[in-house]
Amino acid sequence: AQSVTQLDSQVPVFEEAPVELRCNYSSSVSVYLFWYVQYPNQGLQLLLKYLSGSTLVKGINGFEAEFNKSQTSFHLRKPSVHISDTAEYFCAVISNFYSSASKIIFGSGTRLSIRP
Amino acid sequence: GAGVSQSPSNKVTEKGKDVELRCDPISGHTALYWYRQSLGQGLEFLIYFQGNSAPDKSGLPSDRFSAERTGGSVSTLTIQRTQQEDSAVYLCASSLSLYRAGQEKLFFGSGTQLSVL
């Protein structure tokens, strides 16, 4: 069965500092990976995704993530954060993509808070 | 509509009552999910509909929870004999398809905040 683990429930950082939000997945087959973001009082929206090809994927608002198959990780990074990045970030996985049994599973989320 | 619509946006009910939550997905989207979002629990998968296939109900927490999707469009999540631990935000999401790369992006509704007193 597939699962997603987000190791940090909360990450506080200072404005303009770099940040990494960690995500590890568990699956016995190939996976597609996603990061979704939920800004305060807004719905979830897709930040970036990895389906195939380059293991480094870039998303909106300067975020990027790297797929590491050997470490079963898909950590999200940004070199310099802004106050507007304050949000909750969710990692998600689909495994066995073309199977009728596949579905999107989310992690428990990481709350990113930016301090001025 | 332009996006996924959920109603009601807020629902306050008494313990033991039944509630129905509605989701109108984006027109043409064949995949529809229900998730539950609680403080510190992230997004908990409840149920998944894909086209005419039998729904994946593996995430429903108890037999008090059920969902249906009529005509491949509108979905209703029903919670019978509500309990205080059912209090949460219930989110609906839809996508074009889960079987074609590029069509798996989920579009979320604003959710229904359920409070069981």
Image: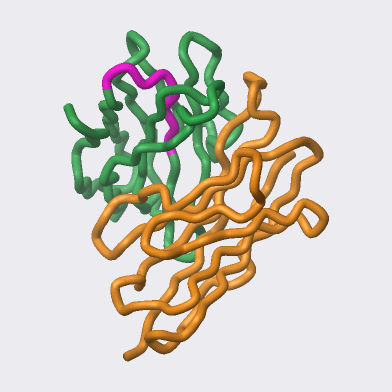
Residue drawn 32% across the image and 91% down it: A116
The magenta-colored residue range is B27-34
Chain A visual colour: orange
Q: Is A95 left, or right, of A85 in this rendering?
A: right
Residue A1: percent from left, percent from top: 74, 39
**Residue at image point 54% right, 12% down:** B53
Name the one closer to the observer, B55 or A97: A97
Image coords of residue B95 (percent x, y): 41, 29
> What residue do we see at 53% from left, 22% from top?
B100
Chain given the colour green: B
Give A46 or A88, whichever is nearer the viewer: A46
From the viewer's perspective, is residue A62 above or below residue B83? below
- What coloring was used for the rendering? by chain
Q: Is residue B17 magenta?
A: no
A53 over A85 or under it: above or below: above
Q: Is residue B4 above or below residue B99?
A: below
Image coords of residue A71 (percent x, y): 79, 59
Nearer the observer, B22 or A106: A106
Q: Is residue A93 visible to the viewer in this orientation of the structure?
A: no
Residue A48 shows up from this direction: yes
Residue at the limit of the structure toward the front, as seen here: A54
B59 in relation to A19, above or below:
above
Q: Specify whether B96 is left or right of A83.
A: right
Tag count in the figure? 0
Query: Residue at coordinates 62% horizontally, 63% vertically from top-left?
Result: A75
x and y percentages locating residue B41 in the rendered image = 51, 59
Question: Horizontally, is A101 left or right of A64 in the view?
Answer: right
Q: In the rendered structure, does residue B32 fall within the stretch colored magenta? A: yes
